[in-house]
Amino acid sequence: MKYVLAFTVGALAVAASAQAPGYRVETVASGLEHPWSLAFLPGGRMLVTERPGRLRLIEPGPDGRPLLRPEPVAGVPAVLARGQAGLFDVAVDPAFAVNGRVMLSFAHGQPEANHLRVVSARFDGRRLQAVQPVFTSQPAKQETQHFGGRMAWLADGSLLFGMGDGNLDRTDAQRLHTHLGKVMRIWPDGGVPGDNPFLQRPQARPEVYTLGHRNPQGLVVVEGVPFAHEHGARGGDELNRLRPGANFGWPMTTGGIDYTYARVTPFRALPGIEPPLLEWTPSIAPAGLAWYGGALFPAWHGSLFVATLKERSVRRVPLTGGAPGPQEVLFQELGERIRDVRAGPDGAIYLLTDSPNGRVLRVVPSPS
């Protein structure tokens, strides 16, 4: 018999089932130091970033099982690894089979003057070749907080990526002359698409695609439409549908309050501000975002998956016509901070656990 408990977060019901889950969780790799991102390569291979600055390769071993190579991928640029700073996302070019290109995002510089940097490189199977910086955030910021760093490809071959507000001067998220608190769009060689929304705005950074973000750490494109989530402070985590030129409000509007319990702003909504699709208060600390269109889990088809750090779960958010439905809380039995979630080419769900001894996990259906 199935018993379902329902409670409310924000305005949406969240369901937790008391029956045994219809999945099993396998360990693909362990012993990773704060793994941050996972990307899939042809031939069953995977790339994993570790926040201290290492890129690791998982590939089929002699028996066909996944094997984490002991030596890191060579050629990774120097990374500022301190606090929240480090090596962040890895994104594999959709045309990788032809060009071998991967993109990396990471913290660059010194603690007192640092940037988000994106580089393009060619991966030959063991090392990165022809590493070229294609974006370095401006101006330099202080402290090692709120970098964003997630990347996603649009259908036209351009690259979206998020940049946090740096946490010190949060109002920079509303200023177009700085990259702080924005989502950017570039070509993989660093060029700026000619239809970027602020390209003709005097003194605006031409890479800016959207503004008013606090710390976006989830980004995925679903049927041509980009979705992003971001950390609030004490509450006010958001899921947003991105639209070129849109302003998502931070710090003028938010559903949360500051860590000091002071009000950030008296406004939850204002004219001209894009409202969130979802808001999570109390905070769940969303850290990774995936779209599931696979066949292994038919009941999960057409859902966003949100990795969470504070809640130690993955939220499943079904979308119907672009509108979110009742959420499901998954994988809390692991008791782990989940840094990233990905839908694999095999139809399985992959998770990264955020710890000094982090793991890559694979979720598959349990036997009948």
Image (tube, grey):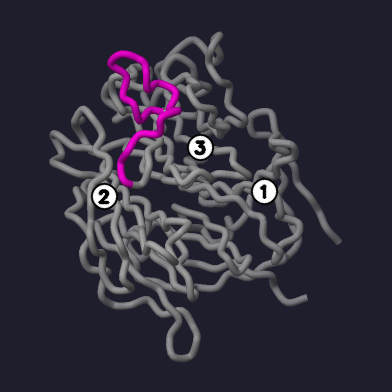
The residue pinned by badge 2 equals: 86
- Residue 187: which disc? none
- Name the residue rendered at 31%, 71% in the picture: 124
Magenta span main SS = loop
- Which of the two labelled residues, at mark 2 and mark 1, occupies the earlier sequence position? 2
What percent of the width, then of the height, locates residue 137?
A: 26, 34
The residue pinned by badge 1 equals: 303
User: Label 1: few (<14), some or many (≥20) within 10 Å?
Assistant: many
User: Label 3: few (<14), some or many (≥20) within 10 Å?
Assistant: many
- Which of the two labelled residues, at mark 3 and mark 1, occupies the earlier sequence position? 3
Relative vertical location of residue 268 with respect to residue 361 in this rendering, above or below: above
Q: Is residue 21 visible?
A: no
Which element type, helix, strand or loop, lies under badge 2? loop
The residue pinned by badge 3 equals: 229
In the rendered image, the quadrant that contains the N terminus is bottom right
Magenta segment, which residues? Answer: 189-208
Q: Do tag 3 and tag 1 residues touch (Cβ < 8 Å)?
A: no
- Name the residue rendered at 52%, 40% in the picture: 284
In the image, what residue type sits under mark 2? Gly
Relative vertical location of residue 205 with respect to residue 108 in this rendering, above or below: above
In the image, what residue type sits under mark 3? His
In this view, the residue farthest toward the right is 1
